[in-house]
Amino acid sequence: MPVIQYRRDLHQIPELDRDLPETIDYLQKALSRHRCRVFSPAEGALCAWFDAGKEDTVAFRADVDALPVEETGESPFRSRHPGRMHACGHDGHMAMVLALADAIEARREPLRQNVLLIFQPAEETTGGAKDICDSGVLTEYGVRRIFGIHLWPGLPEGTIWTRPGALMAKNSEVDLRITGRSAHITRADQGLDALWWGTEWLRRIYAMVDGELPASELRVLRFGQMESGTVRNAVSAQTVLRGGCSPWIPSASCAAGSGSWGRISPGRAAALWRPASAPVTRRFGTTRGWWRRCAAIWGSGRPPSWTSRPLPRRTSPSISSRCRGCSSSWGRGMCRRCTPRTFTLTSASWNGAWTSTGRCWICCKQYETGGRAFCPAP
C-alpha cells in the first residue's frame, strides 16, 4: 500500500496516550501480510521482528499517539474522533515505518541485519519510551542501534537525512516554585516578594542561556506559564514557573536533574544574584565608607558598631533587630527611643523609608541611608 494511503488512514483514527485500540488494530492488519513476528512488549506498544538470522539487530521507531486537539480542516481524511487529531505528525511516522516493513518484505534476502520495528505509545504524555526500554525487548533482540523516524518539513522530497550520534534534543519539563512571604503592598518591605524574584530569575536565566553559554551548545530553555499571588494589593507569597528545557548535548542539561532545587534563604538568594563586580554590602547599609558620608548628620565622630557589641535580647526574632546608631533594640526602621508607647515591637513595625535622605516619621530627625530608615543616635 502506498505510504500516502497509510498516512491518510491513520490520520482519521487519532487516539491518545496508551489507549490505542483502533491504531493497534490497523497496524496489526498492515503487518500481518509480512513474514514477521508481531507482538506487544508494553501497554499500547507494538513490535514487528524480521529475523534475518544475524547476530545484530537495527531498530526503527515510530510514535503513535495523537493530541487532544480539535481538527478544523475540511479534508476528506480529517479526524473522525472529535477533540483528537494527529497534529504532530505521528500518523506520518507510522506510515513511513509501515512502508519500511513493505520494503523489507520485498527485499528480505539481502538483509545484513535483523530488523525490529517499534511503534511507541505515550510520546505526547511521556513515559512510553521508558516502558519499552524497561520491557527488555531491546536486549532480548540484540538491538545495537535504533533510528527514530521523524518528519522534517523543509528537507527535499524523497530524501532521508541522518548523522552519527544524537540527532534530536533531549526534552525535560522544568517547574520552579518560589516561596516568599505575603504582606500588604504598602508594607512590602515586611514581606518577601515571590513575584519579583520570579521575574528577576526569569530575566537572568534567559540572559544566561542566550548570552553566556557557548553558541556551540544548542539548547532551548523557555517558560510558557507563570502563576503568582492571590490579590492585587498584597505581595505575592508564591510564584510558580513552568516551562521546558531541551539541550542537545548532556553538558547543557541542568546539573540538578529532577526533583527539588532546595530552599534558599533571602540573604543567600541576594548573594546568588548579585553581579560579581558589585561591592560587598551589609544588611542595613553599604560599607563602612557609608559612615563618613553620614557622620555630620549623625553628630558623632565614631561609626555605629555592628560587630563589637553583643546583640541585645530581641522581643521578636522576626521583626526586631538592633539600631546601628545606638545599638538598642528596634522594630524595623526605628530605634526603641522613637517607638511610641502604644507601639509594640511584637505585633507591628514601622516601615521607614527607602529614599536616600529624609526624616524619621516619629521624631522628625534627619537621616541618610542606603537601605531602611532608622533614627540617629541620641
Image (spheres, helix red, strand yellow):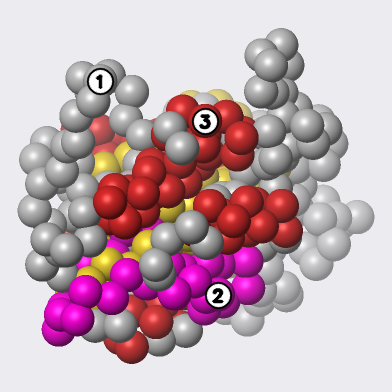
Residue at 25% of width from left, 33% of height from top? 210
Residue 155 placement: quadrant: top left
Label placed on residue 5? 3
Observer-side mark, 3 or 1, equals: 3
Residue on which the image places disc 2: 40
Residue on which the image places disc 1: 157
Q: Position of residue 360 (x, y in %)?
A: 63, 36
Residue 104 placement: quadrant: bottom left
Q: Is residue 54 magenta?
A: yes
Distance (Cα) linking label 3 and label 2: 24 Å
**Residue type of the residue flagged with mark 2:** Ser
**Residue type of the residue flagged with mark 3:** Gln
Residue 176 placement: quadrant: bottom right
Identify the mark nearer the N-term, 3 or 2. Answer: 3
Identify the mark nearer the N-term, 3 or 1. Answer: 3
Q: Which residues are magenta?
A: 37-61
Asked if residue 186 shows in the view, the reply is no
Between 83 and 300, the one nearer to me in the picture: 83
Within 10 Å of the Cα at label 2, are there few (<14), some (14-19), or many (20+) other Cα atoms?
some
Q: Position of residue 130 (x, y in %)?
A: 46, 73
**Residue type of the residue flagged with mark 1:** Glu
